[in-house]
Image (tube, grey):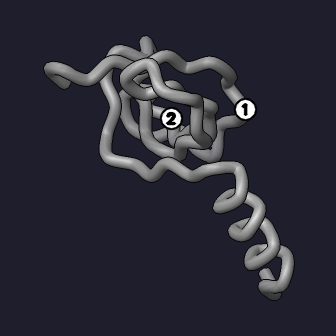
Amino acid sequence: MAGITYEITEEIGVLSEGAGGWQKELNLVSWNDREPKYDLRDWAPDHERMRKGITLSADELAELKAILNEMDI
């Protein structure tokens, strides 16, 4: 991804693992030297490549948690 820099500041957890060792992970990631945000996406085993994902602020993550807590799963 040319022009985009990232640093995984905290590895929080792995949700699943797919073909070739790619893992869907929840991490705290700093994109382009900005404040880290919660990030959910697939990562290659070496964390050198990634697929599309979503980033969430702490407030957004808290809201998602509240929504998930109310679901009957």
Residue located at (84% from left, 84% from top): 70
- Quadrant the N terminus occupies: top left
Q: Amino acid at mark 2?
A: Gln
* Position in image of residue 50 (x %, y %): 34, 31
* Position in image of residue 58 (x %, y %): 70, 50
* Position in image of residue 20 (x %, y %): 37, 28
Above or below residue 19? Residue 55 is below
- Quadrant the C terminus occupies: bottom right
Quick one: label 1 or label 2, which is nearer the N terminus?
1
Above or below residue 26? Residue 43 is above
Residue located at (74% from left, 78% from top): 67
Numbered disc 2: secondary structure: strand
Q: Nearer the viewer, residue 60 or 46?
A: 60
User: Gap in Å between the C-alphas at discs 1 and 2?
Assistant: 12 Å
Q: Amino acid at mark 1?
A: Ile
Residue located at (26% from left, 23% from top): 4
In the picture, the disc for residue 12 is: 1
Residue located at (77% from left, 61% from top): 62
In the picture, the disc for residue 23 is: 2
Q: Is residue 26 left or right of residue 51?
A: right
Foreground mark, 1 or 2, reads 1
Above or below residue 9? Residue 39 is below
